Image (tube, coloured by chain):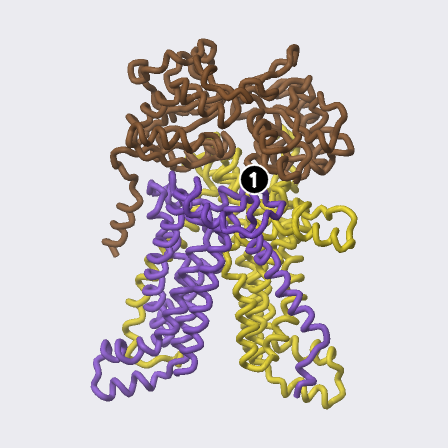
């Protein structure tokens, strides 16, 4: 059994893969605890840059940027999840109907178009219709490109739910709305949760599109960080990066656990 | 759906709230303490966005940001371009009580005769700096950048700013700005292409940091930025090259359709106060265009070699705004350089 | 399953209305508008004039010399930029494949419990902000950064390896950014692979590597192609890695487009045209993928 699965050297490459992926992150994490103001010299273990993140001269700017990022991500992810759920119901349960192929292509459009093209197109669009760029434009742009990311896990989950559950409920005289609310929705919950988390992280992380459609004085965390690192990597950026890393890991772990739990109960 | 759309439109419209000011400024060019002081004195909340070249500021204002900012800080030639394009609002001397503080030589400037749209912010020069720990040889010529000695090759950062690179290149070759002479333009093009392999990177906002961190041993840079690099511990010498250098003056302009025009005027007037102008100079290490700043200046700034060029240097030149046809040629050279 | 039950069928079109409105309005319409813009006349220093012209595409493809009066030739400047970006994306894809396939295979052949942990480890970095990952890499490989210090302290190199601001650094950055995109689809394909096929081949005295080449690769090919597309498309339009790791010395497709909108040249129609050409290339790649996938599916 084991023989045909085993290839010499594959373990080594896997470990190489992990080293490449983790080395930069670990280095930045380690240096975020550097007590020295210079990023090149080690000045002993210190939490000063974490204190600086919350109280330093940039604290207000980064705080505002973080607030913008989080509120936009919350709203965009929620809207995208609702829209994607409706779309997934139609695509998975709706059978064949006119425009199904076109709809499928449309849902996946934001995935297929390179990000820089989406960014440019959005900038042109908002300028052409005379909409002032700012919080609102970032929000709608994020909403649109988060839909496919929310759609994928929801549709995948929906495909795994046998129609017989719902059918049984309908046979017992539940209305379609009741069957949906009491049977389908609870079964779908893990898919909804991971779809929402995916959309949330995608929105939170986006730099290129936001950079093009943000208006005057508007920053999200990634654009604020970009503005800072352009002038050189500073220790407080490493602390912010480590904090963001922790948030991301927390979210992925949550998504992973929810998904695993969802898989155990059908 | 309609409601949602309406909602997003409302969200997207600019806030006309009282007590706001939106400034479009260069990176690392105003001390936070000064902004705090202004906010404390007036109760106006200041938001600052940054840009890293005159051209990118213009492009972004044209890309729908005009009407979102109250003031911007373009350099001399760019003030002229923006005024010609009708992007600036004007003010009267009555609206700007401190107008008389402007040094006479900066009052009747060609790009804004009589100061109707703009006030001086800081002025300075652009040339280059060399880390003297790495290279001790002769650095009096622009050849240090364009035909560098072996010790500096591959360790040079160049400003990612079309205008400044092309003007310094022209000075090195001794050709005029905005020329349409084919041989001269070809020579400029060829010289830059030959120089590029010796350069490590293009970057404006990183220009100081690469010198401090040692990632670059020489770099095209602004005089004040170089002074800051020196203050942060890099052994760099700023050069006033024998072929000449670029002089510029950054100006605070009142933008057309400024959402908070009154606050903008208050801010500009505030910056003309010698105490405040000196605060900017102490921070940015350039020179203010305002009278009476001397008593408030740090000694180190007053006497810095970057701000006090030696006697007998070749005078600097201001950038010129070329017409569209000529600009196209310079754009082509820049694209050629970066292709 | 996918056939659906009848009760949902009449609702389907209505359920799709929000999707059509949001994506149609904020993704599709902008792309269409961008196509229109690529045929407009540029305004000096940014903006457009509503006069239709082919000037942007002319600038891309036709070279009339620096002064615009030489006989028209094919313009190589932008084709070279595309060529370089394509090459870089292709090398990145190949590297990701060489490292990603064995990794995916290794993970997929672990027992179920440890498999989940391996997979989790591979995906975590993907969720860390791309910008932060790129900056971290830059910090790691700087001339006096931790990597060079470590190499010099163990005596492997005498001076710092110049890595930052080289094509190698950009390549490394792209590879590092998109590696998980390669591993995941291949993993999904290998997980479904029926190992009885390999055993049958082994019974017929085929060597491990012959089996891999002749049996495994054809079967998991859709996963490999999906992975290649997922790496290739974003790598082609990548913006952060060339800008931060490559020293912004040469234009890539991404920075060329950005320069037209945010940089000094302010040529919107040209930026829109370059975007259109990039989009066309990507669509060709996707159609190629869809056709290959369909053919594999039919087999």
Task: Identify which residue is drawn at 69% across, 48% down.
Answer: C163
- Quadrant containing the N terminus of chain A is bottom right
> Can you tell which quarter of the image residue B236 is in?
top right
The image quarter containing residue B97 is top left
**For this rendering, which residue is in front, B216 or A104?**
B216
* Residue ID at (31%, 61%): C18
Residue under the image location 42 percent in, 66 percent down:
A104
Chain letter, colour yellow in render: C
Name which quarter of the figure residue B100 lies in.
top left
Secondary structure category for the residue under label 1:
helix
Q: Colour of chain B?
A: brown
Residue B6 horizontal side relative to residue C281, left or right: left
Residue nearest the viewer, comparing B20 with A150? B20
User: Residue B126 at what x, y percent from top left?
Assistant: 59, 24
Q: Is residue B336 visible?
A: no
Q: Chain of mark 1?
A: C
Question: Color used for chain A?
Answer: purple
Where is residue A115 shown, x and y percent of the image?
A: 49, 53
Give the position of the C terminus of chain A as an image quadrant. bottom left
| Image location of residue B286, percent across then percent down | 52, 22
**Residue pictured at 70% horizontal, 77% vertical:** A7
- Residue under label 1, please give it: C58
Residue pushed farthest bottom? Answer: C203
Residue B124 percent location from the top left of the image: 54, 21
């Amino acid at each position: 059994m084991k023989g045909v699965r085993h290839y010499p050297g594959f373990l080594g490459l896997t470990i190489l893969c992990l080293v490449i992926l983790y080395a930069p992150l670990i280095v930045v994490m380690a240096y975020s605890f550097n007590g020295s103001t210079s990023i090149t010299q080690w000045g002993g273990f210190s939490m000063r840059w974490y204190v600086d993140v919350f109280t330093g001269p940039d604290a207000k700017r980064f705080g505002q940027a973080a607030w913008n990022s989080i509120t936009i991500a919350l709203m965009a992810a929620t809207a995208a999840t609702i829209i994607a759920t409706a779309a997934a119901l139609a695509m998975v349960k709706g059978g064949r109907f006119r425009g199904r192929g076109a709809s499928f292509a449309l849902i996946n459009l934001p995935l297929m178009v390179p990000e820089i093209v989406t960014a440019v197109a959005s900038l042109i669009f908002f300028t052409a219709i005379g909409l002032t760029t700012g919080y609102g434009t970032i929000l709608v742009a994020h909403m649109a490109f988060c839909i496919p990311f929310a759609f994928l896990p929801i549709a995948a989950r929906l495909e795994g739910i046998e129609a017989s559950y719902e059918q049984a409920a309908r046979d017992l005289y539940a209305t379609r709305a009741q069957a949906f609310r009491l049977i389908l929705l609870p079964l779908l919950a893990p898919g909804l949760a991971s779809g929402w988390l995916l959309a949330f992280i995608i929105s939170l992380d986006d730099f290129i599109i936001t950079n093009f459609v943000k208006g005057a004085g508007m920053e999200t965390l990634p654009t604020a960080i970009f503005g800072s690192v352009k002038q050189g990597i500073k220790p407080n950026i490493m602390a912010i990066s480590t904090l963001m890393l922790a948030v991301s890991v927390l979210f992925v772990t949550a998504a992973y656990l929810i998904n695993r739990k969802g898989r155990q109960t059908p | 759906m309609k409601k949602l759309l309406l909602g997003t439109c409302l969200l997207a419209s600019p806030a006309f709230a009282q007590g706001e000011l939106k400034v479009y400024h260069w990176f690392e060019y105003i001390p936070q303490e000064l902004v705090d002081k202004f906010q404390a004195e007036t109760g106006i909340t200041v938001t600052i966005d940054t840009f890293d070249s005159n051209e990118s500021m213009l492009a972004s204002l044209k890309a729908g940001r005009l009407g979102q900012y109250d003031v911007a800080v373009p350099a001399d030639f760019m003030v002229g371009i923006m005024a010609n394009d009708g992007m600036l609002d004007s003010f009267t001397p009555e609206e700007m009580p401190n107008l008389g503080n402007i040094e006479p030589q900066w009052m009747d400037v060609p790009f804004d005769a009589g100061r109707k749209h703009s006030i001086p912010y800081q002025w300075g020069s652009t040339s280059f700096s060399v880390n003297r720990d790495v290279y001790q040889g002769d650095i009096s010529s622009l050849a240090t950048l364009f035909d560098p000695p072996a010790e500096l090759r591959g360790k040079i950062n160049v400003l990612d700013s079309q205008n400044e690179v092309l003007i310094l290149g022209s000075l090195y070759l001794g050709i005029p700005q905005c020329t349409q002479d084919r041989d001269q333009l070809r020579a400029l093009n060829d010289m830059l292409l030959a120089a590029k392999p010796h350069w490590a990177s293009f970057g404006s906002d990183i220009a100081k940091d690469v010198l401090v961190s040692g990632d670059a041993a020489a770099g095209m840079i602004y005089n004040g930025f170089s002074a800051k690099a020196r203050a942060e511990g890099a052994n760099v010498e700023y050069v006033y090259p024998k072929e000449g250098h670029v002089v510029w003056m950054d100006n605070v302009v009142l933008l057309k359709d400024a959402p908070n025009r009154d606050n903008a005027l208050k801010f500009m007037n505030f910056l003309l106060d010698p105490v405040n102008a000196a605060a900017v100079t102490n921070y940015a290490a350039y020179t203010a265009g305002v009278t009476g700043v001397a008593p408030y200046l740090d000694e180190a700034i007053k006497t810095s070699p970057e701000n006090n060029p030696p006697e007998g240097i070749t005078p600097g030149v201001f950038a010129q705004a070329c017409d569209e046809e000529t600009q196209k040629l310079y754009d082509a050279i820049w694209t050629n350089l970066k292709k | 399953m996918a056939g659906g039950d009848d009760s949902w069928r009449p609702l389907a079109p209505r359920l799709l209305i929000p999707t059509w409105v949001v994506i149609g309005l904020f993704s599709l319409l902008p792309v269409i508008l961008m196509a229109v813009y690529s045929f407009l006349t540029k305004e000096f220093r940014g903006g457009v004039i509503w006069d239709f012209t082919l000037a942007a595409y002319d600038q891309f493809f036709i070279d009339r010399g620096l002064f615009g009066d030489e006989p028209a030739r094919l313009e190589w400047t932008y084709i070279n930029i595309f060529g370089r970006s394509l090459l870089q994306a292709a090398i990145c894809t190949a590297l990701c494949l060489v490292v990603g396939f064995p990794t995916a295979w290794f993970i997929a052949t672990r027992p179920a419990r440890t498999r989940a942990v391996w997979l989790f480890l591979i995906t975590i970095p993907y969720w860390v902000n791309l910008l932060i990952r790129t900056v971290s890499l830059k910090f790691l490989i700087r001339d006096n950064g931790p990597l060079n210090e470590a190499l010099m302290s163990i005596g492997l190199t005498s001076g710092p390896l110049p890595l930052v601001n080289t094509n190698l650094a950009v390549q490394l950055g792209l590879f590092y950014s998109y590696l998980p995109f390669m591993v995941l689809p291949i993993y999904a394909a290998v997980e479904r692979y029926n190992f009885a096929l390999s055993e049958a081949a082994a019974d017929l005295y085929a060597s491990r590597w012959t089996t891999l080449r002749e049996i495994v690769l054809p079967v998991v090919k859709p996963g490999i192609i999906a992975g290649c597309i997922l790496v290739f498309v974003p790598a082609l339009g990548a913006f952060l890695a060339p800008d931060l790791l490559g020293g912004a010395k040469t234009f890539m497709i991404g920075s060329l487009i950005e320069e037209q909108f945010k940089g000094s040249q302010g040529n919107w129609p040209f930026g829109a045209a370059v975007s259109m050409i990039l989009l066309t290339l990507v669509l060709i790649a996707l159609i190629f993928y869809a056709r290959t996938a369909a053919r594999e599916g039919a087999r």
